[in-house]
Image (tube, grey):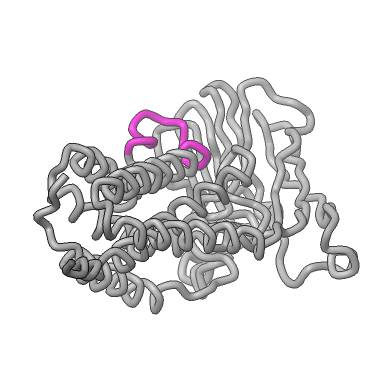
Amino acid sequence: MRESLDPRRLARAAAALGLGGLLALLPGTPAHAHPAGIQAAVDYQTTVMAVTPGADGLRVRFVADGSQLELRTDGRPTVEVLGYDGEPMFRVGPDGAWRNERSPSVYVDIPGGAARAGASPRAEPRWQRLTDRPVVRWPDHRSVWHGSPPPPVLADPGRVHRVLDWHVRIRVDGQPATIDGFVEWLPRPRADAWWLAMIVLVAALTAMGVAARRRPARGRWVLAGTALAVGAGTIAYQMLVVTANAEAAPGAFALALLSRGLHLLLGAALLGGAAATLAGRDFGLFLVAVGGPLTAFVAGLPNVALFHHAVAPVTVNPVWARLIEVVVLGGGTGVLAFILARSRRPGPSPSP
């Protein structure tokens, strides 16, 4: 099959845009102890065990999105969440979710917030409606581990350690109850093995690029297959994260997907590029050449913590998240390596 698109042009476009994306991302990825939003991976896993005593129509879970607790009712019971000093902090019931503006616990992460609001654990609550739905989310410092790993973890980091048993006091229809849970340290994965898998994938695609200098038709198949895997992996990972962390409410799932629109758009562009490449369209090659490296840097590079930490922000086994990361980061980078390896055309055959 004849290729009218010069592979050297593809190489220059992919390299320029891919490296540009990398340079744009690197200054914007500082490490924070508790950053807003969803962290790529962490070492500690929070588990909600139960509400004691049990209450019909009441559900509590921990979500990675902001390291928050989510409390939801079926609209029947009225639940008050008590703050760090025992004061009413949130109220959830048939009339929706409310926040006590005078609860000091609300302002723990806002310097000076409690003083501005006149907050006090002894003040009469002043309720402000958050939503008309019976659900509330809040970051609760009682349900996460703070600081350095404890001595048992430092002594034996290769084993699961239960580092904290936590309790959050609530009132259900005026009766005292607690949300009970625990925090565990989970052993870190073998990061070197996952990096090696990614490097092997890039090296394999580089070798295929060299072989494709004289077999451009096969090169199209390799690029299309790689783009298909990277695009599908990118979309699949975003769906897993959103499914695990989006609020179970009408429109919430769609809004969560919209917040990840760039990643989904890149994944869809690669799927389209793969189909067009297989159909022999040059614009498909261009989509793959540009979209592959860009997806690796935008959707893959920020998630390399998956190789180094045990807990991923998904409900499936985190091994699947790491496999997807190998495909997205390694495959996207491999597209660039493939094109650069193929860009030097073979020399002319010697004359008889």
- Residue 95 location in percent, x, y? 45, 30
Nearer to the camera, 304 or 106: 304
Q: Looking at the rendering, which quadrant does residue 255 occupy?
A: top left
Q: Is residue 61 visible?
A: yes
The quarter of the picture where the C terminus appears is bottom left
Nearer to the camera, 194 or 265: 194
The number of numbered badges drawn on the structure is: 0
Rendered position, 181 above or below 147: above
Q: Is residue 208 left or right of residue 7?
A: right
- Residue 291 location in percent, x, y? 27, 56
- Residue 202 location in percent, x, y? 46, 61
* Residue 248 covered by magenta stretch: yes
Tell me what residue is drawn at x 30 percent, y 46 percent: 218
Q: Looking at the rendering, which quadrant does residue 347 occupy?
A: bottom left
Tell me what residue is drawn at x 72 percent, y 44 percent: 169
Tell me what residue is drawn at x 52 percent, y 30 percent: 93
- Residue 6 location in percent, x, y? 14, 62
Tell me what residue is drawn at x 22 percent, y 67 percent: 345
The outermost residue toward the left is 4
* Residue 258 covered by magenta stretch: no
Rendered position, 6 above or below 88: below
Magenta span covers which residues?
243-254
Q: Is residue 182 left or right of residue 226?
A: right
The outermost residue toward the front is 352
Nearer to the camera, 27 or 21: 21
The quarter of the picture where the N terminus appears is top left
Q: Is residue 259 visible?
A: no
Nearer to the camera, 119 or 46: 46
